Image (cartoon, rainbow, N blue to C red):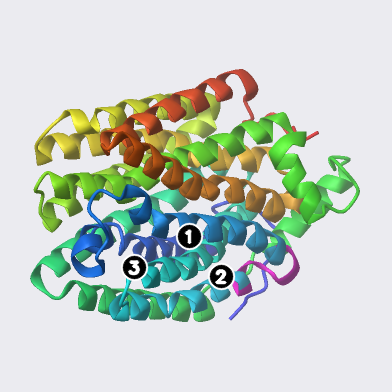
Amino acid sequence: MSRAMEPRIGLRTNLRPFIQQLWQVFLVGLTIGLERTVIPALAERDFGLERGSVTALFAFVISFGIVKAAMNFASGRLSETYGRRPVLIWGWLAALPIPLMLYWAPSWGWIVAANVLLGVNQGFAWSMTVTAKLDIVRQGERGLATGLNEFAGYTGVALAGIATGYLASRFDPRLSLLVFGLVVAVVALASALIWFTETLPLARAEAQARAAAGGAVVGAPLTAGRAMALVTWRSLPMQAVAQAGSIEKFVDAAMWVLVPVFLTTQGASLVEIAWVSGAYGLVWGTGQLVTGPLSDRIGRKKPTVAGFVICAGGIAAFPLVTGVAAWAALAAVTGFGMALLYPTLIAAMGDLAPPEWRGSILGAYRFWRDLGYALGALAMGIVSDLAGNPAAGFWFTAITMCGSAMWLIFALPETHLTGDQAK
């Protein structure tokens, strides 16, 4: 049930709702992680996908990215009207059919359709855990809050990938996904209904306090179009963060699909693939415990740019080495790069967004960020198919990451503790 909250911000003051949000994002991570190892490896065996057709294989990531991007923006707008908690609950309702669809799927089209619902779930549920955390912390705690949030979420992604890899190697792969997915979805929905505190009153109280102190940036209501315009072109700092968020998803799409397929062609088992993917997710997740708070001390820009460069190096070297140990090491390097850039980008957009517009601004940012799944998957698929070699997809991703880093260097000012910069 929703609980009334005093309009006081700060992590210590709101520790209980913060823990509730961490639990929720961990479950969201488990939900997306259940596909990371098993589904790409079964594409040809169970669903008849033609060997070497990377674009067709990426179709389920493309559908996920497009829908999640749209739902990110929609959830931000809806959460400012109805609250964070109802939107979170809607996200979990969308997740319930996913394990059933994966189990009964007669064709790859069903997997693509299941990922449409996964996009709704992630766009609503994960978005609300981020927005709710930024509602309850001070500006100097945003890096810590986003670091903890993404640590919980991507630890869930990694653990689900490892767990389902082991389960699928011992039992029927589809049955493993069915049981694992249903347990997670039911527990998450029950937790959201019983144990999640509404935080929208805190955002509204913060906005009123800032307005009373003369800190309002723009007095007019923020329409959906204006929020998207701010993030896309009107605010150059927001634009820089948005493009970076989109491009960094190229790396995650590659680790989600390109890496398992590549490892399968190299003769790796499901358990070995699970550990390589898990190394990426675990380093990404746990690293954010350090990198999020680090950005509260040294700023957002330096760790973000460093993360892009490290990711580019890790992903470019992937097809150049052999052996599970070497692949796992490169996956860990790539995960460390993601740990540097991922929470700092969210915190930077949180710095730039006025509190009364936070849901809409973060929704617009997450629209562009997760559209990167679709854009990256489509581009990598086309490049790999044209080249006749999946290695081309890795190198394409590395090049785009370097280009995005250059954009950040020249277009993004330091946002930490500098006040609102949306113009």
In front here: 99 or 142?
A: 99
- The vertical placement of 175 against 160, above or below, is below
Residue 315 at x, y = what percent? Answer: 30, 33
Label 1 or label 2, whichever lies nearer to me, is 1
Q: Quadrant of residue 334?
A: top left
Residue highlighted by disc 1: 63
Residue highlighted by disc 3: 108
Residue 258 at x, y = what percent? Answer: 29, 45
Name the quadrant of the N terminus: bottom right
Distance from label 1 to label 3 (Cα)? 12 Å
Look at the numbered discs 1 and 3 and tell me whether their residues touch, using CB distance below 8 Å. Answer: no
Residue highlighted by disc 2: 88
- The vertical placement of 106 against 253, above or below, is below
Q: Residue at x 12, y 74 (%)?
A: 171
First in sequence: mark 1 vs mark 2: 1
Q: Residue at x 22, y 53 (%)?
A: 51
Q: Residue at x 41, y 29 (%)?
A: 307
Q: Residue at x 55, y 45 (%)?
A: 369
